[in-house]
Amino acid sequence: MKPFETKSNGQHGEETASAPNVAGFEKVFNRRHERIRGLWQRGGVFYARFSATDQAGRKRDVFRALEGIVTVAQATESLRKLKDDAAERAIPVEGRSPTFKEYAERYLLEVSAHKAPATAAKERTQIAWWSERVGSLTLRQIHRVHIDSSVEEMRKEKQSPRTINLYLGSLRGVFKRALNQGLIRDLPMHGMRDLKVTMRQRELVPLNAFLRVLAAAPAATKNAVEFTDYFRFLLYSGAREKETLRLRWSNVDFAEGQVVIGSDGLSKNHEARHVDFNPQLKDLLREMEGRRAPDSQWLFPSPQRGDKDIHAKTFRESLRLCCAAAATDLSGFHSTRHFFISTCVMAGVDFMTIARWVGHKDGGVLIGRVYGHIGDQHRKQQAMRLNFKQPEDNVIRMTNLDAVA
């Protein structure tokens, strides 16, 4: 292993490829004649030695001059600060750089615990996909060319730009953490932009489609009462499927006219939000309160809970049966969320307020991009309802206006 010296232009030098004579460096000892590892001296100048890996992947020794240091005590302190300085990106971390697969497994263990289970599962799937392609390479060996070739592979598989961006986001999360921990000098995807995504505009599902599903419930499913309560709540609140199942009666505040969604910290963005009552939501909750199960704290208790107070796990089978009976094809429970947002847009509710109700953090930008056209169509339809025609003798003519003027 051949060391190379670093020329200095300040207190700590910059790396160069010049190779000093190894025999010219002397070991440094403290007052107790104990060897100070990593500290050397030559020609009256103290040097710090680090194990480093060059761009070709070769491991070498780096000697960095500690200028302005005249005593062993000063040199020892300078060496300590240099090693502890996380901002000293010019010196790679000592030891072997972990492979992407090794580090990704550690990353998932450290990070996934702080994310929603569904989000963590998706991220694990995406990172596993990257591990299949670059998992055997160390973090320092992965470059832009590896990422570009993988993106091209996804393009050939007809993956959408949005899907590709999600995979790149997971990869970027791994490398950002590695960068913060000093395992790499910079991001291999530095300067790489996400692919342009064309937002698909949502078309309005007519109210009759939802009403047919509700009408079919009594004959289609044995959980008709629980299902219709749940289905109507989603329609009137815009809430997501799973977060609604976890609602407790303590989350309903009739005095303030609000229901708090996500107070358990398990919502998509891990934050609670307050959905204000509209007339239909208020009436529904009053109905549900009147026939509330006395032995349960949940808005939607499990029909099979027995002696345990647990909430329902899912109503998807009931939805499938009701849709089949009503000859209606809905895109799952998420269609109720689209209906709620569309109805709010057509009612003239500002996008920021809608975003707060449904849990968007962008202040309504996404709603404007995806649902804005529905508001435009609604305004045009309303304009066509206007009728300024009057009986011929009551028509306001320009001559009359001139006379008034």
Image (cartoon, rainbow, N blue to C red):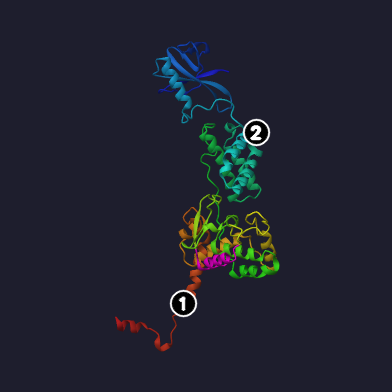
Q: Position of residue 403 (x, y in %)?
A: 30, 84
Task: Tell me if residue 202 can be seen.
Answer: no
Q: Is residue 284 magenta?
A: yes
Whole-angstrom CA distance, mark 2 to mark 1, is 68 Å
Q: Quadrant of residue 126?
A: top right
The answer to whether residue 393 is above or below residue 148 is: below
User: At numbered mark 1, what does the secondary structure look like: helix, strand or loop?
Assistant: loop
Q: Residue sitting at 58 percent across and 29 percent down?
A: 97
The answer to whether residue 51 is above or below residue 126 is: above
What predominant SS class does the magenta segment belong to? helix
Q: Nearer the viewer, residue 229 or 195?
A: 229
What residue would you read off at disc 1? 386
> Which numbered dot is residue 106?
none
What's the residue type where badge 1 is placed?
Leu
Task: Tell me if residue 377 can be seen.
Answer: yes
Q: Quadrant of the C terminus?
A: bottom left
Q: Which residues are magenta?
A: 277-292
Q: Position of residue 199 (x, y in %)?
A: 55, 56
The disc, 2 or 1, on the residue closer to the chain's N-terminal end is 2
Q: Residue sitting at 43 percent across and 18 percent down?
A: 75
Q: Position of residue 150 (x, y in %)?
A: 62, 42
Q: Is residue 154 magenta?
A: no
What's the residue type where badge 2 is placed?
Ser
Q: Quadrant of residue 200?
A: bottom right
User: At numbered mark 2, what does the secondary structure look like: helix, strand or loop?
Assistant: loop
Q: Quadrant of the N terminus?
A: top right
Q: Position of residue 128 (x, y in %)?
A: 64, 41
- Label 2: how many Cα within 10 Å (few below 14, some 14–19, many 20+): some
- Extreme residue toward the left, this view: 405
What residue would you read off at disc 2? 136
